[in-house]
Amino acid sequence: METKQFQAESKRLLEMMINSIYSQREVFLRELISNSSDAIDKIYYKALTDDSLTFDKDSYYIKIVPDKENRTLTIKDTGIGMTKEELENNLGVIAKSGSLAFKKENEIKDGHDIIGQFGVGFYAAFMVADVVTVISKALGSDQAYKWESHGADGYTIAPFEKDAVGTEIILKIKENTEDESYDEYLEEYRLKSIIKKYSDFIRYPIKMDVKVSKPKSDAENEYEENIEEQTINSMVPIWRKNKSELTDEDYEKFYQEKHYGFDKPVKHIHISVDGTIRYNAILYIPENIPFDYYSKEYEKGLELYSNGVLIMNKCGDLLPDYFSFVKGMVDSEDLSLNISREMLQHDRQLKLIAKNISKKIKNELQQLMKNEREKYEQFYKSFGRQLKYGVYSDFGTHKETLQDLLMFYSSTEKKLASLDEYVSRMKDDQKYIYYAAGESNERIEKLPQTELVADKGYEILYFTEDIDEFAIKMLMSYKEKEFKSVSSGDLGIENEEEKITESEEKEHKDLFSSMKEILSGKVNDVRISKRLKSHPVCLTADGEVTIEMEKILSTMPDNQNVKANKVLEINSSHEVFQALKNAMENDKEKLSLYTNLLYNQALLIEGLPISDPVEFTNDICKVMV
């Protein structure tokens, strides 16, 4: 029996394929099962054009047979089989695909697509086997043949006895090494796990003889082990069924089976597209946030299948970062895979699918907000922060996509409100969308800065998350209405009182100059307030950086000491103002005492630290004495 050399490639190429191309050894089983499925597909296609052939689907299957004693793993199929020439051409020439050639020759275009695109998948067997034997009998042939190889040194082909049409691949599993355990590929539970992971939706039964414990009929609490043939794979994937056939329970069961989460999804989305690129998808919007969601360990992505075969566990390219919470899968027949069937050669198809998926997710979320508000608010509680990050990131590239999904607590409604809802309720004379930032709704409600805006009857949105103001600064406006902080220098509320305030400022210019000097390096200005009603004092900010933003930036690891341009505002209608005027005229030391007390009071209201608490308490004691 003559040993033949691999025709197309050198020993080095085969070694590279075995050791480098596949990221995980376990995929060898996926590749061999996919090849077996292709072989059965070929009989199906032959039956479509050859009246002498009948295709009884129940007669076609793939069987996995582990043999620990002889250290072999056999993959049998009842497919079309291979002639001697086909064994030479398909297995003797590295990277020549018999499935792809068959597909082209027969101009297969219907939805029942053949999986195989490349011939190298077969050689993945050498990752776990010292010897690979292929016994095959082709449809319409009287003679079977045995192909055998120990690796890159070559292969042999010889006649062999085999009754039924089909192929058997027998792997002589490698011995364990210090670094690798190959025993696992002979273990029933491990083989079942690999089949469920990668090949659960192969359209033909994948069978195994498994041990089953059953109670003995004639004895209590005694069991006997029997061998029972079981079908391991599900075969018909849920995403290929009509939506009308499926219930909410079916989708939830799939969510649990695929371990997408331990919660109950808020929404499922079933997509079937038959256009430029064909694909099916089932997506889930989870209810609860994963424990590691905002950590670097969290990996976004959807499961990616090619014709029912799992290609990637987490395909990150299918989801934008701002929708990284979405779970689920995509299956397409039109993906261009590389030779390891693990990555894409061209990402054009992926980008098209990803764009469509992103649009669909946004539409579903908008519908959820409109029609199932309680569910949307539950989702938003978990993932609203991520949407805000999406608005802020990439220099606001995605703000148009996400702005309609944002919600904030409303001062008038006492619940979450969308930006669209806020704008629809704006008063005729209102120029801006007003907001206030703070640690909690309760604290914001007590802020002195809100008094004038609230007194006007204008609605205020409460920003309580660190990302809120940064996202809104990036958004800038919504439906041509600019955002305005209640702590900003100009509130855009013009009235006669402001004109009086301006004249007062001129009148008390010396007082404010003295107070500004006392607080040198702490505030940029001291002025009469246009917003305070009952409170004596508050801090506001001039410029883009607000006081709340300064607080957040100061906690960052790369803190660059960014400061807001702080302004100390004094309520000229409050009795404290008279005390300041008296001190200015009669006691400059008392003016300094009062000024520092008011400044520290304003800091406390803002939730900012006092630089010298001891000095502050001593100042209080001075006033009391």
Image (cartoon, helix red, strand yellow):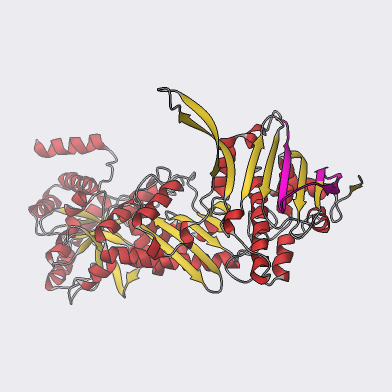
Which residue is rendered at x = 85% and y = 49% of the image? Answer: 157
Q: Is residue 502 above or below residue 284?
A: below
Q: In terms of secondary structure, what is the magenta stretch mainly? A: strand
Q: Is residue 572 above or below residue 423?
A: above
* Residue 149 within the segment the image draws in magenta: yes
- Visible in this render: residue 161? yes
Q: How many marks on residues?
A: 0
> What is the x, y in percent for residue 28?
67, 46
Q: Nearer the viewer, residue 456 or 111?
A: 111
Q: In the visual, does 191 lie left or right of 551? A: right
Q: In the visual, does 332 lie left or right of 129? A: left
**Bounds of the magenta span?**
148-176
Which residue is rendered at x = 68% and y = 39% of the image? Answer: 73
> What is the x, y in percent for residue 582?
10, 52
Q: In the visual, does 416 lie left or right of 303? A: left
Which residue is rendered at x = 54% and y = 50% of the image? Answer: 200
> What is the x, y in percent for residue 404?
33, 67
Picture quadrant of residue 609: top left
Q: Nearer the viewer, residue 52 or 379?
A: 52
Picture quadrant of residue 505: bottom left
* Identity of the residue furthest to the left in this view: 575
- Visible in this render: residue 402? no
* Residue 166 within the segment the image draws in magenta: yes
